[in-house]
């Protein structure tokens, strides 16, 4: 693939206290998520994937039920320490006709070209290698930007991850949402009723965002991706 004007990555320096994003996770808190991230991973795309708004995160809740969870939650993740994020805006990264290995090779070349890599990381796959270099990766999936955070950067020392909502699995319809409990008191007034189709994760996500979008003081999406670009 030929280089384009989008090839140069942007590096953002996110400071402590920044809202990193939202994550659908098994259980009622971050315990199981941190356990999942304890091993570094051995594949190019081994990472914890964090969504950049609440609606996106809620759409991933059924994946937790598919993996055996009967209770899932949405975590709001803030940084305890600073983190570097490599932002790729190349539309080819979101192209579903390009294989994941080809995309990984493309990003590896970007990082080589722009001196991201440390010298002792040559044998590692993409995301574990970025983690060793203290970078997370923000890129377009098929529809939206998401943040791929290497496992070694997903720890209680680096993340303050608190549940915003609890979403138990339906007892009647497997792998669908059966309830919606607001844990973060800041959201309670705006979300005091329930969406008309609770079992549909997309409907629930859209409902949450539509209620919170006009409330500037309530965090429903990250601000760092829209901020002025870094170096």
Image (cartoon, rainbow, N blue to C red):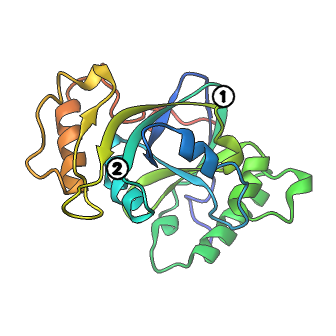
Measured as percent of width and height from the top left, residue 61 is found at 35, 53
Horizontally, is 40 left or right of 122 in the view?
left
Of all residues shown, which one is farthest toward the right? 120
Quadrant for the N terminus, please: bottom right
Residue 110 visible? The answer is no
Q: Residue 82 got which mark?
A: 1
Residue tagged 2: 56
Q: Is residue 189 above or below residue 1?
A: above
Residue 122 visible? The answer is yes
Measured as percent of width and height from the top left, residue 125 is found at 75, 65
SS at badge 2? helix
SS at badge 1? loop
Residue sitting at 46 percent across and 38 percent down? 21
Residue sitting at 29 percent across and 20 percent down? 186
> Going from the N terminus, do you reach mark 2 or mark 1 first?
2
For the residues bearing labels 2 and 1, Cβ distance under 8 angstroms: no
């Amino acid at each position: 693939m030929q280089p384009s004007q989008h090839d140069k990555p942007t590096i953002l320096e996110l400071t402590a206290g920044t809202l990193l994003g939202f994550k659908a996770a098994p259980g009622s808190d971050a315990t199981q998520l941190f356990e999942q991230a304890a091993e570094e991973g051995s594949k190019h795309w081994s990472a914890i994937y964090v969504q950049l708004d609440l609606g996106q995160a809620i759409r991933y809740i059924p994946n937790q039920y598919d993996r055996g969870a009967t209770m899932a939650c949405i975590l709001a993740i803030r940084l305890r320490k600073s983190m570097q994020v490599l932002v790729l805006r190349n539309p080819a990264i979101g192209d579903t006709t390009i294989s994941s290995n080809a995309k990984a090779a493309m990003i590896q070349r970007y990082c080589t070209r722009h001196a991201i890599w440390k010298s002792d990381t040559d044998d590692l796959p993409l995301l574990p290698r970025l983690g060793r270099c203290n970078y997370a990766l923000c890129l377009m999936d098929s529809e939206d930007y998401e943040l791929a955070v290497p496992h070694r950067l997903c720890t209680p020392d680096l993340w303050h991850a608190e549940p915003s909502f609890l979403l138990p699995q339906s007892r009647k319809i497997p792998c669908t949402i059966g309830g919606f409990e607001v844990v973060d008191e800041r959201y309670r007034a705006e979300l005091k009723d329930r969406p008309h189709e609770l079992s549909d994760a997309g409907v629930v996500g859209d409902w949450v965002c539509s209620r919170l979008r006009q409330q500037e003081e309530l965090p429903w999406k990250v601000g760092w991706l829209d901020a002025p670009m870094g170096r």
